Amino acid sequence: MPVTNVGSRWNAGKLEWFDQITGGNIAVFDPATLTLQIPSGATLDVTGGTLSTTSGGIVTALAIYAGENLVEGDLVYVSGWNAASAAFVVNKADADAAGKLATLIMHGTVASGATGTAYRTHTLTALNTNAATAGDPVYLSATAGGWTLTAPTAANAIAQRVGNVSVKSATVGEIRFDLGLATVIKFGSNELQGLSVAESHLVAANADGLHPVRVARATYDFAVNGGAISAIDSGVTIPANAVILDGMVDVKTTCTTAGGDAGTMAISVEGANDIVAAIAVSNGGNPWDAGRHDVVPVGSAATAVKTTQARNVTFTIATQAFTAGKVHVFLRYVIGS
């Protein structure tokens, strides 16, 4: 039955909850090991659920089924359920793989397909922690199962704090892991919902307020698109009612054409020649030599281009076929109405 006369006290460095009538302990928390002990056969009510133990033991362990070979200190995540073993399947956690945040740590070796126990807390010893200071955070690594003293910074990686350095040493360093207190400091692109940065989640195009300036990039590449006289659709779409403010051409490979470089190229969105007017490669002022070059829109109302419907960026080759060249065009635009 529930105990209603509960007191608390510190005893030998541990926090005890006790029955004020009988004096007996109800639960003991050890801050040194971050473990909680409750009496044998007792049930601990946890915010609407129950966490039970039949041995009066530590309640930070979980029976697991190894989804791969696991060793002491491997950080793992729950990847499924094995009905035959009535245990959660765990695999190595990984900072740059989607959905693989660390939730437990291994205390020993468990072979793939075998059952064992994983824990929320653990202390690893005999480590090289000399690059850190006692108290410094430790992070899940982008190497599966591992940890690192430096937070991952790759765009697709998470920075998940999984513990702290408890002893600084080149040979006898120690790290205290507590996955119950693990915190994600930064999210990477792998953890974002696929449509989380879609146009529909930005400020409504027809509403007043702060709007982002968008940038479109389109590419002509002779090695991919060929050089035939034609209009080459880049596949990059500028939305309807976009106002193209400015931009630039970035030529990675100088363009050449058959017969004295007399071939021309133009870039357009809404109408012919509105981004770059057709000009021959042989022209001294052409923008088809390696380097960065201006486009028609230069940030003024007179040169801005507005789309009347969704339009693709188009590269148009005329007069002579191209025989080489790679061109990026960058266009900054906002959505109007």
Image (cartoon, grey):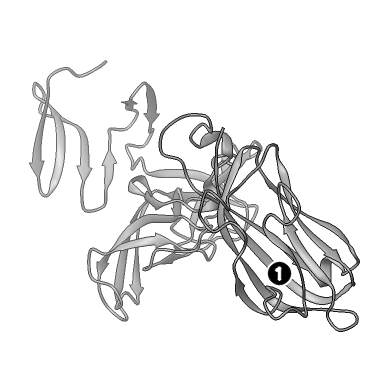
| Residue 248: percent from left, percent from top | 59, 64
Label 1 crowd bin: few (<14), some (14–19), many (20+), radius 10 Å: many
**Residue 290, image x, y percentages:** 67, 79
- Left or right, 107 with respect to 228, comes to left
> In the picture provided, is 245 more to the left or to the right than 320?
left
Q: Secondary structure at mark 1?
A: strand
Quadrant containing the N terminus in the rendered view: top left
Query: In the picture, which quadrant includes the C terminus?
Result: top right
Q: Which residue is mark 1?
A: 327
What residue is rendered at 27% in x and 39% in y?
A: 37
Residue 4 quadrant = top left
- Residue drawn at x 72%, y 78% is 253
Query: In terms of depth relative to the viewer, which is nearer, 5 or 159?
Result: 159
Tell me the quarter of the picture where residue 41 sits. Answer: top left
Q: Nearer the viewer, residue 40 or 146?
A: 146
* Farthest residue, direction bottom: 260
- Residue type at mark 1: give it: Val
- Of all residues, the one furthest to the front in this rendering is 302
Q: Residue at x 51, y 37 (%)?
A: 202
Residue 311, quarter of the rendered image:
top right
